[in-house]
Image (cartoon, rainbow, N blue to C red):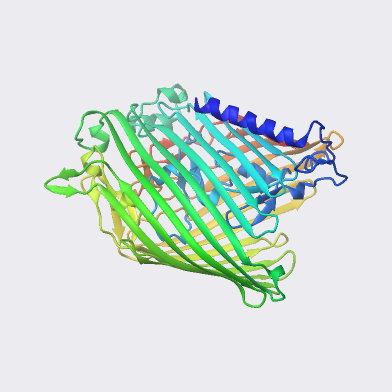
Amino acid sequence: MIKIFLALLTVFFYYGAFAQIGPNRPSRSGGGQGGRSPLDTIGKATKEVAKITDYLIISHENDTTYVDTTLTIKKDYKFNYLRRDNFGLMPFSNLGQTYNSLTYDFESTNLMPSFGARARHFNYMEVEDISYYRVPTPLTELLYKSAFEQGQLADSFFTVNTSPQFNFSIAYKGLRSLGKYQHILTSTGNFRFTANYKTKNKRYFVRTHIITQDLMNQENGGLQEVSVDNFESGDPEFLDRSILEVNFENAENILVGKRVYLDHKYYLLNKKDSLSANQISIGHVLSFEDKYYEYEQSNANTTFFGPAFKASQFTDRVALENLYNQASLNYSNDIIGDLQFNISNTNYNYGYNKVVVLNGNTISNRLKGDVISAGGKYHKAFKKFEFNGELGLNVAGDFDGNFIKGEATFKLNEDLSATAAINHNSKAPNYNVLLYQSNYLNYNWRNNFNNTETQQLSFQLKSNKIANISFDYSTITDYTYFKRDDDNAIKAFQNNKTITYLRVKLEKEIRFGNFALDNTILYQNVQDESGVLNVPELTTRNTLYYANHIFKKAMYLQTGVTFNYFTKYYMNAYDPLLAEFYVQNTRQYGEFPRLDFFINAKIRQTRIFLKAEHFNSAFTGYNYYSAPNYPYRDFTVRFGVVWNFFM
């Protein structure tokens, strides 16, 4: 019924858009460079032709870009389930499963704990992931990509301005994929609706979105040890991965979330209202999010997870209701810059529907309360310099927290810019670190951990001619993590020693005629006596490709090979009950190359992607893993397409 409703809703919006545009079909010029139309957003015929740069995408931070229908190697990197460059992430074998992190960024402006079940959150769209739009004519984007065995990935998007003041968009991304191994089916959906409006006098602005998400994975606990040996042997009998034995075939977990978000602002004083260069506005942000994580299993697996309260058919469920309100006063002056003062309230309700009594100890079932925060922002552009600052502090409530962030950018010329930044953050550990309950006895705890404190110093150099180079140095105190204890049970721990973490990343594309070599190289160094923050020392992605127009420039072709590699390290293991990764220091993984051959093409606004993934798997050794006991993908061929319509 939900799918039928969404289909009818999409048809309704399409007909509404066509009704406002009128019966005339817009002409297109410019071939594959943007699909231009002589009609404006309210259906009046004009002599002015809409350009591709008129189709605006507005981020959560108000940064504005435009729709890009070109085909570049960066588009190939983003043509995946997440729809963003996943360098530094190691995907699991099936589409829609989780990713193992090869690198971490400790820059943060959060004041509150995160929900937990972080392995389920890679495709969970946060407030910062939602964009807003302004388009001269209706715009549609359709994406399709083949999955593994049965299923496919599809993402449909439509946006229209019903007037120059009002825009809405509607989109849905759905995935279903069976996978090559036993019991790893994935089924996910992300529905989002956005709208933005401004009054004709440009005094009142509002942006809002509604999003619902459900991310379900069947879980099998990875390969049994005997199956690990069979996998690594390369025996042709076991190339059919479905015959490899897994730890269990009766569990699944799901993350479900709903969010309503509103951000509006009213200008009390506009610059045009007076001779002064002052601007004053008041703003309000409201965000209500209701989410839950659930682990369901038909029979308890005591060999894998330890003893259980209930032997059959149980469900672990934890929920979070989070209501956030922020009021702000904004002042802008040509000399001083842009200032914001804000105060916010977070009402949180996290927990379970029962109290657990274990070994005579009572484990509470809920974390609930209010946190009052205050903060501010600053921005100033001066000649070739740009300064940004932000700070926040929890002033009342059960959770302490604070952050400060400063950033300075110097733009030497159109090609070269340099940015230096500093960040300090202190916040409570995630909710599932503080409180967790389960049918399995080992997975019940209530911890009173210190805040995790991070400091980061970063520097970034951007230049198309030279290279893009980024450097950051972080210190982490009271780092929290999951690990097996002396009784072989996975628990939450806190490291009371300081960890230092260095990252240096270089990105550079070298061109010679129609050939190009695109390079991304990441070096990392961790100083950690406890061995709880593990990353590979070197991670690299190198793509050698050929690109040119063919068929009298009717098609743009791009073909080549991508090489992915990272050095050996103690890769984190995956726990399907927590939906978290945990530290293991038993076996190192890595040093296996991944080679992908691709052929991409662009015809007008259609981009076609064909890729032979990991085609070297049969001759470079069966030692490739996404996590311990979870092999990476074998050689497979996948196809996909992205199609833009400009009406």
Where, by quadrant of the figure, is residue 397 drawn? bottom left
Q: Is residue 553 above or below residue 328?
A: above
Please indicate whether residue 586 sits to the left or right of residue 73 in the image.
left
- Can you give x and y, in whole percent of width and height, for residue 72 in the image? 71, 45
Please indicate whether residue 280 sits to the left or right of residue 370 in the image.
right
Quadrant showing the C terminus: top right
- In the foreground, 635 or 76: 76
- Can you give x and y, in whole percent of width and height, for residue 487 in the image? 20, 46
- Can you give x and y, in whole percent of width and height, for residue 537 in the image? 48, 56
- In the foreground, 490 or 382: 382
In this orientation, does residue 491 appear? no
Task: Find the residue positioned furthest to the left.
Answer: 360
Going 62% across and 49% down the picture, which residue do you hit? 196
Q: Is residue 225 above or below residue 424?
A: above
Please indicate whether residue 357 sits to the left or right of residue 297 in the image.
left
Going 52% across and 59% down the picture, which residue do you hit? 284
Going 33% across and 27% down the picture, which residue do you hit? 250
- In the foreground, 409 or 475: 409
- Can you give x and y, in whole percent of width and height, for residue 593 in the image? 54, 42
Q: Is residue 168 above or below residue 511?
A: above
In this orientation, does residue 338 appear? yes
Please indicate whether residue 226 sits to the left or right of residue 206 in the image.
left
